[in-house]
Amino acid sequence: MPKERKKFTFSGNLARRILFICVAVLILPLTLHSIFLYRQEVLLQERDVRASMKAIGAELARALGHQIELEWTVLDSATPALLNQLRVESWTAPANARLHFALVSGSDLLVGKREEARVAKVFRHPLSQILLIQDPPFPIDVGLAGTLPRNEQWIEQFSIGETQLQLEVGTSSERIANLQCKWLLLRVGLFLFLLIFVGGTIIWWLYRKLTSPLNALQLTMERVAEGAVHSRYVPKWLGFEINDIGEKFNETLDLVLEHQAEAQRERSKREQMAFELKIGREIQASLFPSHIEPFAGVHISAAYLPAKEVGGDFYDVFPMSKDSRLIAIGDVSDKGISACLYSLGLRSTLRACARSDCNLLDIARQANDLFLLDVQESGFFATLWLAVLNNEKLQYVSFGHPPALLKRNGEILELSTHGSAFGLMEQREFKIGEIELLDGDVMLLYTDGAIEAHDANQTLFGMERLKQTLQSASSASAVLKELVFFSQNTPQHDDIALLFLQK
């Protein structure tokens, strides 16, 4: 069973990324900023507290001194009845008390006037009342000298009028820090509340809108992967770069489909071409003579090795009369079906011209004229080696074709007349070569595919190797075997046609 494709979504990853971005970009910087502001505000608060303590202490000491002086005046001028109404008390004054004095007795402040050695009239005031501050701006302690706790870090002292008393106003940095800490917690809590409920709602809304294009693109990709290749991404609102990616995906998919269609068309063309080439090779091979009868004591063998493409190589031995034969081997320029058709046409022309009343010159002239009519508009031409074998006499003519090789008494001779190729121009006169075949002579006719065969290192077989092969060869098949062995099964780019004559 096919393995089920694992599906994925962008939602979880994107949600984690958004959360990470919020924490990294919003919460952490703002928290660090709040802590930094907290330290700054603590320092500013400390300065303001010290200034406020001085102002409060000075004002309270001035008011308290003014009240003490006023009570001293009352004690000096008031009648006993008035003093009784004002609840003035008789008090045993200390031995060292001055005439007018103010001192602390327990939790009370005594403001009095000494009348006798140890008797004084005094106003009694609870310290908790006269040193009370209404709605202080920060935690603060007020007392007379020596009454405040010693753990107060900041204590400001102030003289009270004409008395020997001193007013103390004190607080601690810890109180101020705690006060700012509460404010910090309140501010951070408010910030988190706004972030979670207000910002969270906005982020959730944006998240839904931003993930919609991603999910749509993912769905389109999954449908394409499942085979719906005509599915396309539709741009979404707030898609931004995702819309651009989706458009690129659509363009890429269109290009891929276009390339696939083009590749399919090319594949069909190649398959059609291969089919046509196969038919061409089969037709070409079927027209080669399967067996050539010996003539005038000459045994003739043939071999053919086609290349990948259909070529223009051909060979044949045409009977002209009871005593003569026309031997032909040729190669039409270029490759493919056209070259194959032209080579078959030239072969048919030579067969038609091979009559007993024609000599080699007439056959060559008529065949060139007819071939020129066929190829004059196409640019094709053909190399050709023709010979008429009459008993033991061999007349030959070469039209741009590689020379035939004749082995006689261990020596290799080249038989060629160096004529122009067929189909280039009208030719009325040809140089004819003539030789008599002797017993033991061996002759090899070949196309240029034989000397241009190459190995894996692109080294050509060449003329010299072909001559060496002829020294020991006994048939066309033996020569072809050496060519195949040299090539080491390297694909050849040209057909190889061989005719081997042995007397």
Image: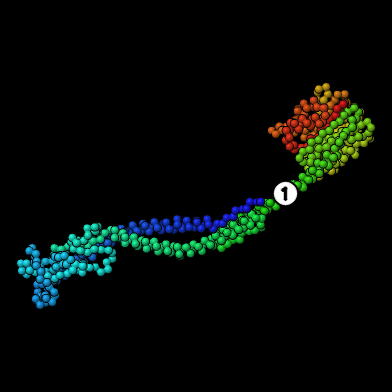
Residue 340 appearing in the image = no
Residue 95: percent from left, percent from top: 7, 63
Q: Quadrant of the C terminus?
A: top right
* Residue 298 position by quadrant: top right
Residue 98: percent from left, percent from top: 8, 65
Residue 145: percent from left, percent from top: 18, 61
Residue neighbourhood size for the residue with mark 1, other residues' Cα within 10 Å, grouped as few (<14), some (14–19), many (≥20) = few
* Residue 369 position by quadrant: top right
Per the image, label 1 sits on a secondary structure element best described as helix
| 492 displayed left or right of 197 | right
The residue that disc 1 covers is 266
Q: Residue shown at 52%/55% (left/top)?
A: 13
Residue 312 appearing in the image = yes
Q: Residue shown at 36%/61% (left/top)?
A: 184
Q: How many marks?
A: 1
Residue 423: percent from left, percent from top: 82, 39
Amino acid tagged 1: Glu
Q: Residue shown at 54%/58% (left/top)?
A: 11
Q: Nearer the viewer, residue 66 or 100?
A: 100
Residue found at the far top of this picture: 409
Q: Nearer the viewer, residue 222 or 52?
A: 222
| 305 displayed left or right of 179 | right
Is 457 located above or below residue 81 in the figure? above
Is 42 located above or below residue 268 in the figure? below
Q: Residue shown at 82%/25% (left/top)?
A: 407
| 157 displayed left or right of 341 | left
Task: Tell me the colour scheme of the image.
Answer: rainbow
Q: Nearer the viewer, residue 482 or 171?
A: 171
Residue found at the far left of this picture: 117
